[in-house]
Amino acid sequence: MATVGELVARGAHHGLRVLGAGEPGGAEGAAAAGEAAEAAEVREVATVGDLGSVGSPGAGALVVLMAGALRAAEPYEVDVAVRRSAQRSHAGLVLVGADRVPVTAARIAARAGLPLLAVPATADVNELIVWLNRTVRGGTSDTVARAEAVLDVLTRGAAGDDEADDGGVAALLAAVSDALGRPVELHGDAGGLGRGAGAQTGASAASADGAADPGAVLVGERVVGTVRCAVPDRAADLVIPSVAAAVGRLVRRTLEHRFAPSQTRAELLAQIVVAEPTHLVGLTEQARSIGLPVDSTHVAFWVDLRPRHDGEGDPPIAERRRLLAGAEMLCLEIMHPSDTWWHVVRVGGSLLLLASDDDGGDGQLLVRAARADVDVAVARLVADEGAVVHVGMGTDQRGLGGIRQSSVEARSAAELALRTGRPGVITVMDTTGLRRVLADLHASPLSRRVMGELLAPVDALGSARAATAVRTLTAYLDHQCSPKHAGAALHLHPNAVTYRIQRITETLGVDLADPDVRLGLHLACRMRGLLDAAPAG
């Protein structure tokens, strides 16, 4: 059996409320009325159309007095009706369309402990009465009524303003809890947006396969928390998936609003990374106009993400896209509160993480702080997303050209980490400058095409024979075309080196006596071997 207090708590979506101290006629005994509303049990719901019939329903009835009965009523008639309701020991009196009651009526109700309730004249009274009857009867009717009340809260929330502040999740859960009559809580941080009433921060978020949980809160396809009812309840079981979906939408909208400026700058950064060096001048003013720290010191990290895939072939494209979208939002959440100025950029199927320092300070301080943030992000990507992550880091550079240079180095280092099997380890380029030059050549589509064409004839021999040919030619050119010294490096007899070089030059159709040919082939071989070995940080 429901109490008046429970009905008021769950009936906010119908506009049901207690006439309180802030309203005319309600100041007298508002506290007593509130206590009575909490305690009074409702046995039935009765509807009356005139003041003279108020005394007809029996004890324990919640009497709904229709709006027409109050339009032309004199104050003394209202006093009499309230007195009759109190004498009949009614659970409460609901006044449809009443903004106030006479002071004398409020005093009579307060002395008798009779809750005076009200609903707006615009309320759908038929729906209200059906809902009240279901809730009072309990059982299946109560379950359905409370579930409908929650869905009504969610519907009104979806039709409202899409802009949400950081208290939006807590406010939504509070309204849901009131309608359900049970506390509903958010477990997991949900991007830091669930703090407040009804949120349980500090609890671990759902695991990577937690999307199967009906209470899982998803941003994209990433589980950021779970919605739970604090006590077992059938109505809660029915609506928790809808509540979780609403919380997910609210979190996503808030995160999109929060990170919109960063994502706008990220679009320009993507252009800078893939642009040829000669095109950077035209992008400088555009970068400054949107607040990109052009003249700062930058260090880039290139993150190659792949789903953990045990089957044959590559993982499905849809799975890689899901992983990339979830990883982008996770990195934004981690790096947004950091003291370092971060940008997270999607480039192709990878992420570029760019850290900047606009104070012109020590670049090594920036590198250390940025690496610490990236270490946290990589650990979360592996733990939360189940991803295989290969990370490359560039050197610290200044200016717009420095953004591109550090990004090129980071990308080459990430490819190195992928080829040499170093998941979860930040791999760096060397600091001598040679690999950085080769990395810049490798980043240019034109350079890659030209160098690829030089070695195309040996590539046609198959991967194993091509690798042997490139390794032999590299050693030969590294040692000034000396078969003796190249043989020592390759652990081959000089005659074997000479024989191999003869076969390679015939296949390539080149003359190594030409210095331009030697330079071109040497660069091509060095670019091909760029990812064979490099230090890990």
Image (tube, rainbow, N blue to C red):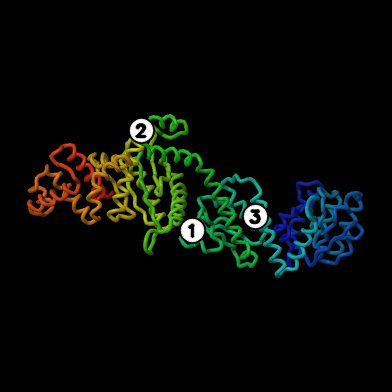
Residue position for label 2: 399
Considering depth in this image, is 109 or 189 the residue closer to the camera? Answer: 189
Do the CB atoms of the residues marked 1 and 3 lie less than 8 Å apart? no
- Mark closer to the observer (1, 2): 2
- Mark closer to the observer (1, 3): 3
Q: Is 227 placed left or right of 8 in the picture?
A: left
Label 1 neighbourhood size at 10 Å, few (<14), some (14-19), many (20+)? many
In this orientation, does residue 206 appear?
yes
Q: What residue type is labelled 3?
A: Leu
Query: In the image, residue 171 lies at what x, y percent?
Result: 62, 51
Q: What residue type is labelled 2?
A: Gly
Q: What residue type is labelled 1?
A: Ala
Query: In the image, residue 487 lies at what x, y percent?
Result: 10, 51
Q: Which of marks 1 and 3 is nearer the N terminus?
A: 3
Q: Which mark is residue 154?
A: 3
Query: In the image, residue 467 lies at what x, y percent?
Result: 22, 53
